[in-house]
Image (tube, rainbow, N blue to C red):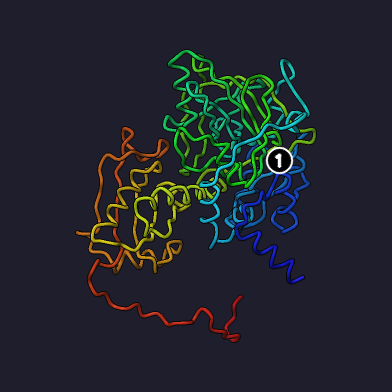
Amino acid sequence: MKVVHQRRTRWLEGQRTMLYQDLRAFLTVLKESGELVDVTRHIALQYDIAKALAKTSAVQGPALMFKNTGTAFPLVAGLYGTRKRALIAFGATEQTIHDKVLQGINNQIAPVDFEGTPPCQEIVLTGDAIDVTKLPVPVYSPKDGGPYITAGIVVSENPETGIPDIGNYRFQIHGPKEMGLFSASNHRFGKNIAYATAVGKELHGAVVIGVDPMTMFSCQVQSSDTTNDWFVAGGLRGAPVELAEAVSNGLKVPARAEIIIEFTVDTKNQKMEGPLGEYTGYYTPASPKPVARITAITHRKDAIFQGLLTGKPITENHVLKQIPFETSILRQLQAQFPTISDISINSSGGVQVYVVIAMKPRYEGEPRQAILAAMASNLHPKWVIVVDPDIDIRNAAEVEWAQSFRVKPREDVFVVDRTAAGPLDPSTDGGFSSSVGIDATKPFGVEFPDVSEVPGWRDFDLPEINRG
């Protein structure tokens, strides 16, 4: 038994083995570990699903499988609503997670074609049979413009190079065969739409719902426009992604997905899309946006729909982004600053605005250079703080302590004007923002007082203290 336990521990701590073949394998593990609970009573799609998700999120509770949605499909949500479940998905610990993700990103694996009829096409709906309103798509927030698909992965290709992109984007249900879509202009899906429109090409896409965790997380990895995201997903999985050709276009989609919605993008006949409670915690206003015209819906015979709560931090949306964002930005920064040991991109800042970096400066002024590099990343953060490695960057009290007693504000705090901003940030003016850098490391080359911390207290056993 001890040998089996040791093997299990080593596997969890970072072996490059495919952890989950599909969504269902992950659901089985979550259920066995008490991290997924069935809800058998009817829960209304309008607002009540969101209330249940907000409640379990607030108490770090389990993911929820809603069995009675008023449709033919169950709905699962909250799968990545806690850091604990994210680590289960990766088969990692807090100590091994960054190395695990870096290993996957640095050792990418090409996809393979699925042999035979793929599970995602057990049921094929085309023509008059198409009706996306039959799916259990929730309305999450009271002022949302309608039901939104929030956990969908969009597959599209660069019209010029054919390089595939997968990313997590929102879709508002307009009717049985129409959805409103939004992609920021700096995101690859948005760039593909803009390029196709400019050259007069029709852009095809597919919304993929219900995939294995590593394919879901790979959508959040920050990479270049020339990256084939199926290779990244394969690297994170430790095994190739199995792909099948979509039934109404030439795109390749995950063969073991639960549901695929194939579409073409119509940029000429735009419709009002929004509002939606977004990752910033604020509603984005409604505006005319392109329409996704559905050309086919395919799914497994007993398909499971997946939802994802977004809105005021911290929600599942933020937890899903955090690990891939942190690791991919850490990878970029360490290439220039090798003494950076860790990075925290806070969920409370939408996993974009507030960044804390731990590093050991090699020369005076290096923390400022690292701050500027972080500001220039795709995150466009407003706040970047650099601290010494002895600071726990995920402990707000320790970061505040470093800011309080290792900073000379006039020398160590600076503002960079007219920096790029997140497109949904409600405080931006004209698309520009400004960013604050704080060097909260000890003065370089200067003797600094020792920290007055009691040694060994964490391991001291004192049963008389009530731990409850």
- Relative to 336, does residue 306 appear above or below in the rendering? above
Between residues 460 and 62, which one lies in front from this camera angle? 460
* Residue 241 picture quarter: top right
Quick check: 88 left or right of 372? right
Is 318 left, or right, of 440 in this rendering?
right
On the question of residue 137 being in view, the answer is: no
Image height check: is 229 above or below 206? below
Marks counted in the figure total: 1
Q: Secondary structure at mark 1?
A: strand
Residue visible at 42% across and 62% down in the picture:
393
Above or below residue 92? Residue 295 is above
Viewer-proximal residue, 44 or 231?
231
Rendered location of residue 151, percent (x, y): 60, 38
Is 119 displayed left or right of 219 in the figure?
Answer: right
Residue behind mark 1 = 75
Q: Quadrant of the C terminus?
A: bottom right
Q: Is residue 109 left or right of residue 358?
A: right
* Above or below, 151 relative to 374: above
Residue at 30% x, 48% y is 372
Residue 448 seen: yes
| Dot 1 alpha-carbon crowd within 10 angstroms: few under 14, some 14 to 19, many 20 or more | many
Looking at the image, which is closer to me, 126 or 203? 203
Quadrant of the rendering where the N terminus is positioned: bottom right
Residue 461 % position (x, y): 57, 84
Q: Position of residue 105 (x, y in %)?
A: 52, 46
The one nearer the camera, 46 or 164, is: 164
The image quadrant of residue 132 is top right
- Kind of residue at disc 1: Leu
